[in-house]
Image (cartoon, rainbow, N blue to C red):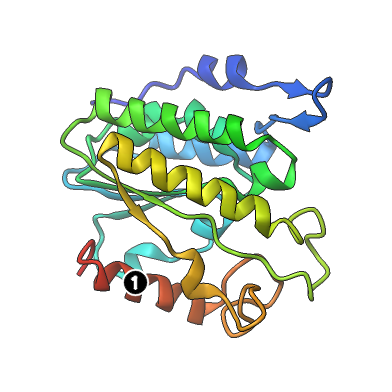
Amino acid sequence: MKKSLVLLSLISASAVVTAQGWDSTYRSTYYEQKVTLHRSIPDTKNEIIFLGNSITDMGEWSEIWKNTNVKNRGISGDITFGVLARMDEVLSSSPAKLFVMIGVNDIARNIPEAVILANYRRIIDRVQAASPKTQLIMQSVLPTNDEFKPFKNHYGKDDRIRAVNNGLQALCADTGVIFVNLYPRFLDASGKLDKQYTNDGLHLTGAGYMLWKKILIEQKLMN
């Protein structure tokens, strides 16, 4: 299927909800650069897509898995609203597998857990309706570590991260979707993102990506 270049969905879904005290804007210049690029790349068969924000964006997924069918659809700074606005491109190839990790930037912007979970449900519904043969894997939000400085809006919110992860796990059970709880595997003894996996308290070092890979192999979701 040829990908549409029409970006009306991006425009209509973008909003700033200042009255409630949280921000759902996602259309940065980088977002548009990446989405227009993704829409310009031809679809291929049996794609395995990693979808998310900067934590996904920074991963060299085809090299990590030694598989050119593995595609990176991470966009730095993205939130659940932004993912929803580009689901048509993500699903246009009817991918064999779709791994989703999204939500930490929503939490940093104080988007309520109920809104995040409702958006998760919309993501699941879109996949199941548009590409029912796709194996959908929803992954938990990772912990953070407030001993670092660069991402102050993201730190100190692990109670909310755990609440979102618990809600996502329940939603996956209700909808028959695979849930991978990465969160506990990345914790140190004090309950923070372990420094052996991060150098800024939010994003992953190479060791973090190798642990992520190990977990997916252990759960027989990749090989």
Image point 57% across, 79% down: which residue?
197
What's under tag 1, amino acid-wise?
Ile
Q: Residue at x 79, y 76 (%)?
A: 147
Position above or below: 59 against 148? above
Q: On the image, which quarter does residue 156 sit in?
A: bottom right
Q: Is residue 74 visible?
A: no
Residue drawn 44% across the image and 22% down it: 5
**Residue 100 in sight in this render:** yes
Q: Nearer the viewer, residue 83 or 110?
A: 110
Which residue in the structure is indicated by mark 1? 215
**In the depicted structure, whether residue 159 falls above or below residue 28:** below
Q: What count of labels does the image hold?
A: 1
Q: Quadrant of the N terminus?
A: top left
Q: Could you tell me residue 81's position as x and y percent?
A: 57, 30
Q: Residue at x 24, y 55 (%)?
A: 69
Query: Within the image, what quadrant is residue 210 found in?
Result: bottom left
Where is residue 45? Give x, y as percent.
Answer: 16, 43
Callout 1 secondary element: helix
**Vertical placement of 40 versus 218: above or below?**
above
Q: Is residue 104 left or right of residue 40?
A: right
Q: Which one is in front, 126 or 72?
A: 126
In this rendering, the answer to whether 33 lies above or below 162 is above
Of 1 and 26, the residue lying toward us: 26
* Number of residues whose C-alpha sits closer than 10 Å to that of mark 1, classed few (under 14), some (14–19) or many (20 or more): some
Residue 52: image x %, image y %? 49, 48
Closest to the observer: 94 or 69?
Answer: 94
Which quadrant is home to the C terminus? bottom left
